[in-house]
């Protein structure tokens, strides 16, 4: 298939948030992410690959999987694929997917008796958001609420950072966190926020069966308004001379401790 200028322009637009929001689509690239997408229940609208992918066993299997999910699977040139993908090396394959839209209310109504949710309040770096989704996926978090002042979920750098986690758990994007947290408390959730000036060490907490843990902006942390809604302010004690702790690292530390207590 030859990708004509209009089609190339349409696909290239998905690198911009404005068009992702308008079209409710996003693009993933590379064998890992496209493979995770093919194994997920996300609707795949189109897929594109270069000829060399067909000569690789893994690539051939992936193309077959994609063809079972959509009739719109096309062989394209290196140049055409490079025009629409975000990275220098896209591994020869990309796919366009329909966004999955979860509401905060749906995520808050967990079916599990044990329900751990995580919220991102003003996380600005796409790499951090992606790593935190990946970490939440690793530790079996039941769902994520991404505040409207954070980087959006379908940012290409976020997607790459999730390493497929975006396809494994429910995530609500663009959430009004103050409203969602207030509703969570009404539903019986205990709300924990991370705070460098918090009064409770993260490893000394008996987490409730329904827990919502909030991580804040890289520079100034959780907002004051959100802190006012917290039941517990968690601190990760500093033992060395470091000025600050990366928020994605903090996420992993806290979630690890959470499961040590549950197990």
Image: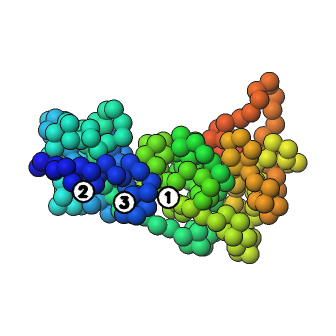
Give the residue at mark 2: 46
Discs 1/2, front? 2
- The answer to whether marks 3 and 1 mark residues whose Cβ atoms lie closer than 8 Å is no
Along the viewing direction, whichever of 234 and 121 lies nearer the viewer: 121
State left or right for residue 253 relative to residue 60. Answer: right
Label located before the other in sequence (2 or 3): 3
The spot of residue 221 in percent (x, y) is 74, 46
- The answer to whether marks 1 and 2 mark residues whose Cβ atoms lie closer than 8 Å is no
Give the residue at mark 1: 169
Residue at (38% x, 48% y) in the render: 15
Counting other residues with Cα less than 10 Å from the Cα at mark 3, is it few (<14), some (14-19), or many (20 or more)? some
Q: CA distance from mark 2 to mark 3?
A: 11 Å
Residue lying furthest top in this view?
241
Q: CA distance from mark 1 to mark 2?
A: 23 Å
The spot of residue 120 in percent (x, y) is 64, 53
Q: Secondary structure at mark 2?
A: strand
Along the viewing direction, whichever of 41 and 159 lies nearer the viewer: 159
State left or right for residue 228 relative to residue 133. Answer: right
Label located before the other in sequence (1 or 2): 2
Residue at (78% x, 60% y) in the render: 225
Residue lying furthest bottom in this view?
186
Picture colour scheme? rainbow
Give the residue at mark 3: 25
Q: Quadrant of residue 93?
A: top left
Discs 2/3, front? 3
């Amino acid at each position: 298939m030859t990708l004509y200028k209009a089609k190339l322009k349409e696909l290239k637009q998905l690198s911009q948030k404005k068009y992702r929001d308008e079209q409710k689509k996003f693009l993933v690239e590379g064998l890992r992410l496209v493979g995770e997408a093919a194994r997920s229940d996300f609707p795949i609208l189109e897929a594109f690959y270069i000829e060399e992918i067909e000569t690789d066993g893994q690539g051939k299997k992936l193309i077959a999987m994609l063809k079972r999910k959509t009739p719109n699977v096309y062989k394209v040139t290196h140049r055409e694929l490079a025009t629409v993908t975000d990275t220098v090396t896209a591994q020869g394959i990309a796919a366009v997917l329909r966004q999955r839209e979860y509401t905060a209310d749906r995520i808050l109504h967990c079916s599990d008796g044990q329900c751990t949710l995580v919220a991102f309040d003003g996380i600005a770096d796409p790499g951090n958001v992606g790593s935190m989704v990946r970490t939440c996926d690793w530790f079996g978090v039941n769902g994520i609420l991404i505040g409207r002042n954070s980087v959006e979920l379908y940012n290409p750098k976020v997607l790459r950072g999730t390493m497929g986690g975006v396809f494994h758990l429910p995530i609500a994007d663009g959430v009004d966190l103050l409203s969602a947290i207030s509703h969570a408390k009404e539903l019986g959730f205990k709300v924990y926020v991370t705070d460098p000036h918090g009064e409770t060490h993260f490893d000394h907490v008996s987490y409730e069966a329904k827990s919502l843990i909030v991580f804040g902006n890289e520079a100034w942390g959780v907002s004051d308004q959100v802190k006012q809604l917290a039941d517990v302010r968690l601190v990760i004690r500093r033992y060395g001379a470091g000025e600050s702790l990366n928020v994605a690292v903090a996420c992993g530390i806290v979630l690890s401790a959470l499961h040590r207590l549950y197990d």
